[in-house]
């Protein structure tokens, strides 16, 4: 093991955990499970705290207080990791897979996730602009960056 991000997730410090996030923003998009296939369907509808330009939370410290159903990846069960995109560093490390070359920890550039077309930067709308019944109209393929 050469780098700290190759360690098991449960051995990461709080700082390492936060640095592992690639900043794609997909975890902040509304998603749901297809009842027939079990497939996780992503939408381009973002949490109201999500900043579509920076792909970061506008109030990360208070996110759970302001958005009670905000996901806390650090507390995920094995089944919940399947809800994360296949490119997500947390899912990759949970599955003991290496990070992609575009990950900021490997590229050395925070915007490499955007340059690679992986992030939701400029590709989402706020949940405040979409009726919940219209979520199926916003289904996307997260790999179509």
Image (cartoon, rainbow, N blue to C red):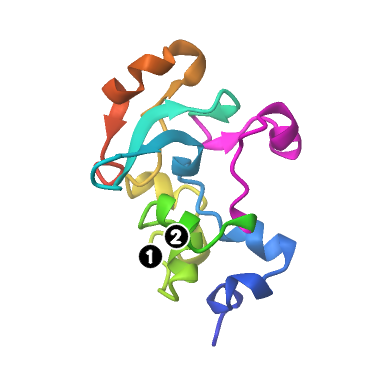
Element class at badge 2: loop
Q: Position of residue 17 (x, y in %)?
A: 64, 61
Give the residue at x 45% y 34%.
Answer: 29
Q: CA distance from mark 2 to mark 1?
A: 6 Å
The answer to whether the residues at label 2 and label 1 have Cβ atoms under 8 Å apart is yes
Q: In the figure, is residue 43 to the left or right of 80?
A: left
* Res 108 visible: no
Which label sits on residue 100?
Answer: 1
Classify 71 as above or below 94: above
Which residue sits furthest bottom? 1
Give the residue at x 52% y 51%.
Answer: 110
Q: Position of residue 135 (x, y in %)?
A: 36, 22
The image quadrant that residue 140 belongs to is top left
The image quadrant that residue 98 belongs to is bottom left
Asked whether residue 9 is drawn in magenta, I would say no
Mark 2 highlights which residue? 103
Q: Position of residue 55 (x, y in %)?
A: 51, 37
Q: Residues within 10 Å of mark 1 (few under 14, many from 20)?
A: some
* Highlighted range, magenta: 53-74
Give the residue at x 38% y 52%.
Answer: 85
Asked whether residue 61 is drawn in magenta, I would say yes
């Amino acid at each position: 093991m050469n780098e700290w991000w190759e360690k098991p997730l449960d051995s990461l410090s709080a700082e390492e955990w936060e640095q592992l996030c690639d900043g794609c923003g997909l975890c902040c998009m509304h998603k749901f499970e297809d009842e027939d296939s079990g497939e996780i369907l992503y939408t381009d509808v973002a949490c109201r705290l999500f900043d579509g330009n920076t792909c970061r939370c506008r109030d990360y410290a208070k996110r759970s207080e302001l958005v009670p159903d905000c996901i806390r990846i650090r507390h995920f069960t094995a089944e919940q990791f399947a809800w994360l995109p296949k490119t997500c560093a947390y899912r990759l490390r949970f599955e003991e897979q290496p990070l992609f070359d575009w990950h900021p920890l490997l590229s050395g550039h925070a915007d490499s996730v955007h340059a690679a077309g992986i992030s939701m930067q400029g590709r989402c709308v706020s949940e405040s602009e979409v009726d919940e019944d219209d979520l199926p109209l916003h289904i996307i393929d997260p790999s179509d960056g």
